[in-house]
Image: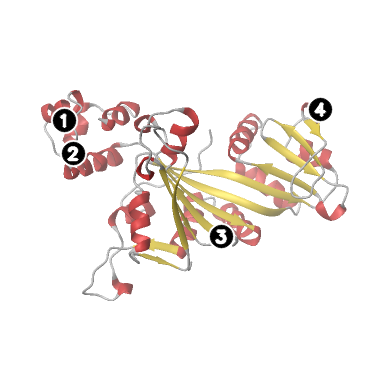
């Protein structure tokens, strides 16, 4: 049973798990040992117990950063802003986005161009963010201090992704997709797109139910949209990690470009509260409700699991680094 792997992963005893779920220890132990299929109502009680017992069910982190600096002095950006030694970066005679050269150390990329208006571009994708966090840690700096330095350099924030990692399965992505289709998603955005992605989980199971679900809310061409997906499936395909052993079950990404990215970073620096910054954006643009045909749609009650995800009756989040 997948609950056993997750229970052991976060250090919960059988007794505490059973007690929190309202089951006897003997019954719960039998479910684990006999690897029985679990009734839906028992499964929900166990899932809720995991959420309540998990010391940190949600985490928040940067997953993509792209910043343009209005200078052609690449050495200044690398050594004074990033605080890396230029001699350790490898220069490659190719680039992206119209840039012609790239200085790279691992997944940290600094792009240059002979055109003054292009400036110097920093590109950090997911692994690049994690790598740069290690450098920041060694420098005794945080993302906040780095972004403040970027602001002093009059940098232009081209794209920033904030990711909320769901470690225990609070977000049910297929359910949220269903709610979108049943008009139980109240949103400023006019569009959503859902599909199965990440490759087939099993070559013997050639159907879409064995692929990870992804939900886009808003247009991917706009300066702000959301991407929700079942990250456990992604890790299964990429690394062969069994679903029940995945560190992260789901991910909610806030993808911000241009002015939207700038205002999000400014809000983060002003309030030093990443949860406030992230969830104010989410709450401004989308909420999931439960249909009640006896009431107008504007009065439909917020879905219970969505309310918990948004902060009702749970602890506060902090910006994490790995």
Q: CA distance from mark 2 to mark 3?
A: 39 Å
* Residue 84 locus on image (x, y percent): 74, 32
| Residue underneath mark 3 | 224
Nearest the eye: 101 or 298: 101
Q: Residue at x 46, y 58 (%)?
A: 193
Residue that label 4 marks? 87
Q: CA distance from mark 2 to mark 1?
A: 9 Å
Residue 243 left/right relative to 285:
left
- In this picture, residue 201 sits left or right of residue 293: right
Left or right side of 137 for 81? right
| Residues tagged 2 and 1 counted as in contact (Cβ below 8 A) | yes
Measured Cα–Cα span from mark 3 to mark 4: 37 Å
Q: Outermost residue toward the top?
A: 33
Which residue is the site of mark 1?
Answer: 28
Q: Which residue is mark 2?
A: 21
Pointers 2 and 4 in contact (C-beta within 8 Å): no
Q: Residue 194's mark?
A: none
Whole-number angstrom distance, CA of label 1 to CA of label 3: 44 Å
Tell me whether circle 1 and circle 3 mark residues in contact (CB < 8 Å): no
Q: Residue at x 38, y 45 (%)?
A: 208
Q: Nearer the viewer, mark 3 or mark 4?
A: 3
Q: Residue 18: x percent and y percent?
A: 17, 33
For the residues bearing labels 3 and 4, Cβ distance under 8 angstroms = no
Earlier sequence position, callout 2 versus callout 1: 2
Q: Secondary structure at mark 3?
A: strand
């Amino acid at each position: 049973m997948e609950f056993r792997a997750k229970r052991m992963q976060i250090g919960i005893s059988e007794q505490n798990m059973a007690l929190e779920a309202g089951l006897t220890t003997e019954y719960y132990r039998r479910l684990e040992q006999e690897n029985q299929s679990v009734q839906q109502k028992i499964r929900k009680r166990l899932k809720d117990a995991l959420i309540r017992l998990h010391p940190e069910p949600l985490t928040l982190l940067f997953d993509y950063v792209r910043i343009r600096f209005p200078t052609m002095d690449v050495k200044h950006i690398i050594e004074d802003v990033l605080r890396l030694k230029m001699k350790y970066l490898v220069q490659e005679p190719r680039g992206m986005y119209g840039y012609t050269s790239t200085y790279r150390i691992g997944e940290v990329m600094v792009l240059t161009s002979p055109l003054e208006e292009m400036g110097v571009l920093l590109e950090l994708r997911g692994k690049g963010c994690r790598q740069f966090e290690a450098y920041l840690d060694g420098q005794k700096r945080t993302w906040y201090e780095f972004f403040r330095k970027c602001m002093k350099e009059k940098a232009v924030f081209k794209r920033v992704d904030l990711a909320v990692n769901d470690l225990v399965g609070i977000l049910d992505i297929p359910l949220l997709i269903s709610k979108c289709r049943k008009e139980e998603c109240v949103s400023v955005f006019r569009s959503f797109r859902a599909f199965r992605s990440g490759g087939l989980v099993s070559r013997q199971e050639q159907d879409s139910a064995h692929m990870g679900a992804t939900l886009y809310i808003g247009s991917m061409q706009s300066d702000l949209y959301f991407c929700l997906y079942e990250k456990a499936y992604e890790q299964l395909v990429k690394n062969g990690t069994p679903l029940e052993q995945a560190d992260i079950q789901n991910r909610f990404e806030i993808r911000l470009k241009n002015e939207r990215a700038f205002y999000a970073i400014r809000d983060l620096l002003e309030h030093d509260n990443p949860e406030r910054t992230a969830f104010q954006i989410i709450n401004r643009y989308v909420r999931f409700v439960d249909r009640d045909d006896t009431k107008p749609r504007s009065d439909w009650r917020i879905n219970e699991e969505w309310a918990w995800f948004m902060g009702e009756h749970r602890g506060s989040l902090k910006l994490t680094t790995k």
